[in-house]
Image (spheres, grey):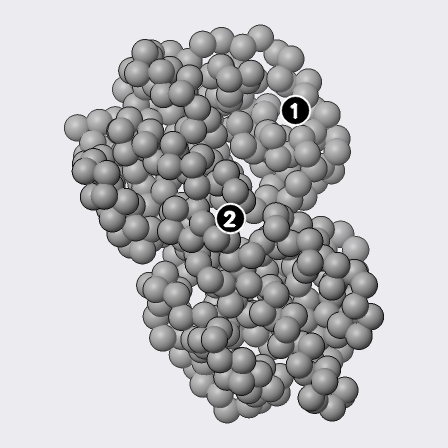
Amino acid sequence: MADLNDSAVYVDVTRLVHRMRKGRIPTGVDRVCLAYLEHFYGRAQAMLIESGVAVALSATASLLLFDWLLGWSEGRQHVSLAKTARHALKLPFRPVSSGSWVLNMGHSGLDRPSYLGWLRRKKIRLLVMAHDLIPVTHPQFCQPDATDRHCRRLQVILGQSAGIISNSRHTAEALQDYADKLHMAIPPLAVIPLGYHRVRLTPAQPLQIPSQPYFVVLGTLEPRKNHAFLLYLWQRMILEWRWAHIPRLLIIGQVGWMCGDLLHELQFNEKLKAHVEFLPDCSDAEVQAYLQGARALLFPSHAEGFGLPLLEALAAGVPVLASPLPVFMEIAGNIPDYLDTDDEEVWLQAIRDFSDREDARRQQQIQRMRDFAAPGWPEHFQKFEAFVSRL
């Protein structure tokens, strides 16, 4: 039986520090890392990969860095936080103690041979989160080197982890299939759904919420999120629908990869810009405000490991139109309206129906979500602690 209190615990913050220093807004994986940081606040020290070497901060410096990172998650002064983080990284580092627990929920360094050697040499007990296997199962939607890097990560995860937390049964099954192909055994694994954290902040500036019906899509601009499909639908509306009947579309997300054509359309297609707005720098409070007023969240992804926006929408009482992914059905059952992205007409009809707040179809989904209870982080960590105690 294992106990997280039997030796030092370190939370790998490499990914979070790197993204904060670049002035980015937390993504889904970042939010998972931040949830673990918050849960282990005061119980764990910070570690990061600096110039290819794993180093740790003292307990006092770790608390300071955790405070800054949690402030970043709330949208506080990204620039000043990044400067403060640079100052923190000038503090004396120390080695990570042998036999320690290391929580690496952001996969930092797992694709490097030096990281594998460090794990073995220091007898590190590694705990990781399996977010998805998309670079392996859907390489067509990823950057050219993403598959090789993810395969190297998976070799370490399967070969060196003391325990794996999977965000869904879907991800766990994909990991099992991958391990079977390599004839590798899977370390102890627990399926523990991610938690939903309700935003209680108010936007720093008053928002211009559209007065006409509008829909929201949340997520980084990348091919697998299928934003191009939605732009195509709106271009059809412009050609086929009466102008006054076309709802607005708010695309909320950061610029990712392989999205040059999409950005060009959003920036230079004047007809499209009359109905579609790209919002790349929204705070959590702004996202929540826009989502709350939407007729529905649109989620036509080709592949997902989990799908936090789905939880956020249903927890806010906002209907969802989504592609029929197994993980969505695992999370939300029969609540959303699942629509095949090969059928444009089905999506256009659903958008037309849901544009009317009182439409029977929309109201039926609202009725279905009445008993929906989004899992919370406290429940997640209760299961996490119980899982680790059994290792």
Marks counted in the figure total: 2
Amino acid type, label 1: Ala
Circle 1 sits in a helix, a strand or a loop, which is it?
A: helix
Q: Quadrant of the N terminus?
A: top left
Compute the Cα span from label 1 to label 2. 30 Å
Q: Is residue 354 visible?
A: no
Q: Residue at x 66, y 50 (%)?
A: 255
Left or right, 179 with respect to 252, comes to left
Of the numbered discs in the image, which one, if any, rests on residue 85?
Answer: 1
Q: Quadrant of the C terminus?
A: top left
Q: Residue at x 74, y 63 (%)?
A: 266
**Residue nearest the viewer, comparing 386 with 51:** 51
Reading the image, the residue beneath label 2 is 142
Report x, y in % for residue 373.
39, 64
- The answer to which image quadrant residue 252 occupies is bottom right
Q: Residue at x 66, y 41 (%)?
A: 24
Circle 2 sits in a helix, a strand or a loop, which is it?
A: loop
- The answer to which image quadrant residue 165 occupies is top left
Q: Residue at x 30, y 50 (%)?
A: 174
Residue 2 vs 87, above or below: the answer is: below
Residue 252 vs 269, above or below: the answer is: above
**Mark with earlier residue (1, 2):** 1
Q: CB of mark 1 within 8 Å of CB of mark 2?
A: no
- Mark 2 surroundings within 10 Å by alpha-carbon count, few (fewer than 14), some (14 through 19), many (20 or more): some
